Image (spheres, helix red, strand yellow):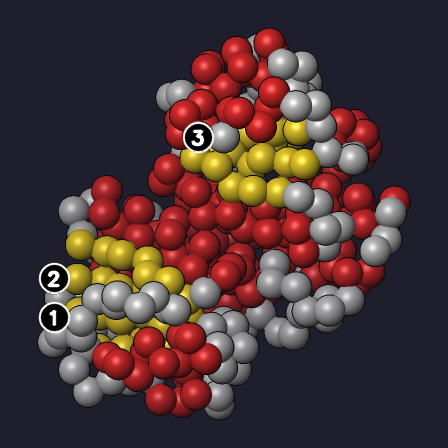
Amino acid sequence: MHPGRFLEDVLDQPRALREMAAAHGDLGELAPAGSRVLFLGMGSSRFAALTVAALLRSRGVDAHAEMASTGAPQPPSADTLVVAISATGGSPETLQAMRRHLGTSKVVGITSRPERPVGAEADLCLPLHCDEEVSGIACKSHQCTLGLLHLIAGHLLGDPELDARTLLAAADASERLLDSPERWLPQAVDLLAGRAVHVLAPAERIGSAEQSALMLREVPRVRADACETGDWSHVDVYLSKRPGLGLLLLRGSAWEAEVLEWAASRSTPVITVGGEIEGASLDVPLPEGGDQVVRTLVETHAAELIAAELWRRDPI
């Protein structure tokens, strides 16, 4: 791992997303789903799947994002489409879980290394086309995985709005956000430096919070956790009673007011991502913030840039 090169990978995401979108403009080789869609993965791969599984469920599809290491897995069946995700193509947990389904379920492998087992053994391999991450930290591969899963969802749903054009719009939005962080990044880092961080997001976008918190843990080694916005006031608010906590709030939940009320009463700084709200200390504006698919592909950049700058100020 080379955290000093992390920013290189972050800034390369728009290019990688465009290349992936161009490579998968047509998913005609992907058969329609049966009655169930099952995503398998670990870490960032699973975080991407959480977002798309929630989208599919909201459209009436029986979809699940399963931690590949589970000891109580869903059983294989002929009417299950399995999407096994491993950027390296060799995650042992994902490979073992995938093999459980081979010969019974329809298995699609998603990986940057099609020659490795997850791609080579699957019934169909869809490469990520995101190139090597020079830092060894999964940011490009996460965004490309999420984009490809959105394309798969669009194909399964027959939704013409979930196509390569949406990913290109997301790449443009990514580029605009990454090109002008000086408007908010120094203040954001000043607010969060030396603090533990809770990253909050609505339930349907909890994958964005998980990925954002992981980047803060993995790069500058900040104590960071993902929290569902509504649930924060029930299970995580207690940690705000001690000083030293900051909140990164990915906007969109109907339950944000209670979070801001607690934060104000305990002098906890709140940075919003994707929309100003009364009581917050700072907002990170998102280009194309109204499009939910684009938002999921762009909003993690806030934590990535904060993580890179925290590491630059205090390398570890």
Disc nearest the viewer among 3 and 2: 3
> What residue do we see at 31% from left, 47% from top?
54
Marks 3 and 2, the one that precedes in the sequence: 2
Left or right: 145 in relation to 124: right
Which residue lies under the disc numbered 2? 35
Left or right: 295 in relation to 67: right
Q: Residues within 10 Å of mark 1 (few under 14, many from 20)?
A: some
> What residue do we see at 61% from left, 20% from top?
241
Residue 262 sits in quarter: top right
- Which amino acid type corresponds to the residue marked 1 in the rendered image? Asp
Q: Where in the figure is residue 286, as x and y percent of width and height?
A: 58, 34
SS under mark 3: helix
Q: Are marks 2 and 1 in contact (CB under 8 Å)?
A: yes
Disc nearest the viewer among 3 and 1: 3
Choose between 113 and 258: the one closer to the eye.
258
Q: Residues within 10 Å of mark 2 (few under 14, many from 20)?
A: few
What numbered label is drawn on residue 79? Answer: 1
Q: CA distance from mark 2 to mark 1?
A: 6 Å
Choose between 159 and 38: the one closer to the eye.
38
Q: Where in the figure is residue 20, as x and y percent of width and height?
A: 51, 67
Q: CA distance from mark 3 to mark 1?
A: 37 Å
Q: Are marks 3 and 2 in contact (CB under 8 Å)?
A: no
Which residue lies under the disc numbered 3? 235
